[in-house]
Image (cartoon, rainbow, N blue to C red):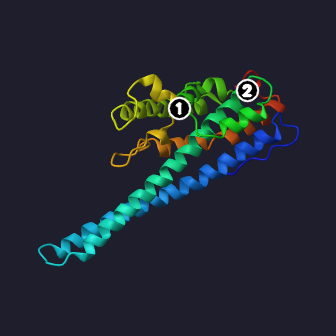
Amino acid sequence: MDFPVFTDAAPLTALEVEALRSLHVTSQDLRHEYESALALTGRCYRLEENAQVYTQGRALTHHPDALHRLGRLADRYERGVGLLAWRYASAAVVLGTSILDRVVGGRPALTAAVVTELCEEPALGQLRDALSIPCSDLLIARESSFRDRHEEDRRELLRSVEGVIECAAELGDGVPTEASALWAGRLTDFDRLGTDPLYEGVLERLLRFADQFPNEISWYLKRSRAGALPHQIPT
C-alpha cells in the first residue's frame, strides 16, 4: 500500500507525517524480507529432508549435514528479521493509532518529543492499549461493513498479543513471570534463543494491521474536508 500524500492543509505536523512515512516504508520492507526469510528457512529444511532420503544407510552424510547447518543459519536470520520487523511494526501501530485517535478527536498535534518516543518499540502494554481502541472510535469515516471487518482483525490481534504474554511468562531464563512486569517490557527484550520466537503466529498479522494507518488518516481527512463524515453520509 503506497504512502498517501498529505497536503500542508492537513492538521498534521511535518514530523508526524515524517514519522508515519518512516515507519510505514520500514515495516513494508521488513515484511517482504521476513516473508523471504520464511521461504528460505522452509526451502533449507525441504532440501535437508530430500538429502536424508538418498543418503539413508550410507557412510557419508556430508550433504544432509551441510544442509542442516544451512537451515540453522536460515533460522537465525529469520529470527533476526522477525524481531526487527516486530520492533518497527509495533511502533507503527502505536504511532498510527495515536495520530488517528487525536485527529478524529480534534486534539492538538503530538509534540516532537512524543512523536520521537512513539517511533521506538513500545512496551507490550502500550501495544495492548493501542489495540484496545475499538474501530468504531477510529474508523468513523468508513462504512459499518468496513469497520466490522477491521474490528475482527483488531480483536484477533489483541488476543494474540495477550497470548505473547502467556508464552513469555513460561520462558524462565530471567524473564519475569508477573503480568505487570511483562506488560511493561518489550517483546525483543524477552526473546530467548532455543525457544520458539514470541512473535510466531502474531507478526504477520501485526504487519498487515500496521500497514493501514497512513491511509486511514488520509481517508478521514479527505472525508472530513468533503463534509462526508458518518452523520452526513447518505444511507
Separation of residues labelled 1 and 2 (CA atoms)? 19 Å
Q: Nearer the viewer, residue 89 or 232?
A: 89
* Horizontal side, residue 32 vs residue 66: left or right: right
**Quarter of the image holding residue 44?**
bottom left
Q: Amino acid at mark 1?
A: Arg
Tell me the element at label 2.
Answer: helix
Residue bearing mark 1 = 154
Q: Residue at x 62, y 34 (%)?
A: 94
Q: Residue at 70% across / 31% down in the picture?
A: 100
Q: Is residue 110 left or right of residue 196?
A: right
Question: x%, y% of residue 124?
Answer: 51, 32
Q: Using the rendered image of the protein, determine whether residue 88 is visible from the camera's viewpoint.
A: yes
Q: Neighbour class for label 1 at 10 Å: few (<14), some, many (≥20)?
A: many
The x, y position of residue 210, in whole percent, is 59, 41
Question: Identity of the amino acid at label 2?
Answer: Arg
Residue extending farthest to the front is 174
First along the sequence among labels 1 and 2? 2
Query: Residue 89 shows which numbered tag?
Result: none
Give percent across and percent down for residue 142.
67, 31
Residue that numbered label 2 is attached to: 102
- Residue at the far left: name it: 57
Q: Nearer the viewer, residue 180 or 107?
A: 180
Image quadrant where one finds the C terminus: top right
Picture coordinates of residue 55 (x, y %)? 18, 75
**Rendered position, 204 above or below 107:** below
With 91 as the anchor, is 188 left or right in this view? left
Residue in the picture at 70% in, 48% down: 22
